[in-house]
Amino acid sequence: MACLAIVGLALWLGRTIPFAFPAGAVLILALLVYWHSRTTGYRCPICSAEFAISAWADFLSPHMLTTKYVKCPACGQREWMEARMRSGS
């Protein structure tokens, strides 16, 4: 629901102040990536370690719908890992 509110705000901002739309879009993207990095964790298929990544790594890592290519901090292997909701989030 919060994502819909943010997108609606961006569309309203783009209609009201057109030159502010690119700045608003970048801000919204940054907030969504930050939120995703705080609520999503990964489990290594090799060593079964569970971990989170930084917002910067979340933004830069290649991804598909439910997987992301990340490096496990425990074993150091890079693999396609399934995104999971972090416990306690």
Image (cartoon, rainbow, N blue to C red):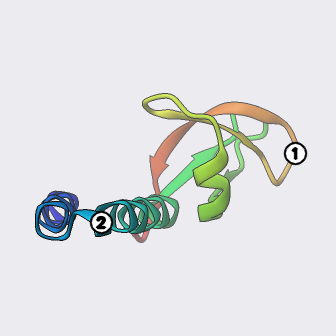
Q: Is residue 88 depicted above or below 53 in this figure? A: below
**Residue 56 or residue 46, whichever sits in front:** 56
Q: Is residue 52 left or right of residue 74?
A: left
Residue type at mark 2 is Phe
Q: Is residue 85 above or below residue 35?
A: above
Image coordinates for residue 71, horizontal then vertical, percent: 78, 44
Q: Quadrant of the C terminus?
A: bottom left
In terms of depth relative to the viewer, which is nearer, 77 or 34? 34
* Mark 2, secondary structure of its residue: helix
Q: Nearer the viewer, mark 1 or mark 2?
A: 2
N-terminal label among 1 and 2: 2
Kindly identify the amino acid type of the residue bearing the numbered disc 1: Cys
Q: Using the image as rendered, state which of residue 52 and residue 15 is in the foreground.
A: 15
Residue 30's place in the image compared with 41, above or below, is below
Name which residue lies at 20% across and 58% down: 7
Q: Furthest residue to the right? A: 76
Q: Are marks 1 and 2 in contact (CB under 8 Å)?
A: no
Local crowd size for mark 1, using a 10 Å CA cut-off: few (<14), some (14–19), many (≥20):
few
- Quadrant of the rendered structure where residue 57 is? bottom right
Q: Relative to 72, is 83 on the left or the right?
A: left
What secondary structure is marked by label 1? loop
Question: Dot 2 corresponds to which residue?
Answer: 19
Q: On residue 5, which mark appears?
A: none
Quadrant of the snapshot with the N terminus: bottom left
Q: Residue at x 45, y 58 (%)?
A: 36
Q: Position of residue 16 (x, y in %)?
A: 11, 69
**Residue 80: x, y in percent?**
65, 29
Residue shown at 33% from the left, 67% from the top: 24
- The residue sitting at 45% across, 33% down in the picture is 66
User: How many labels, in total?
Assistant: 2
Q: Which residue is mark 1?
A: 75
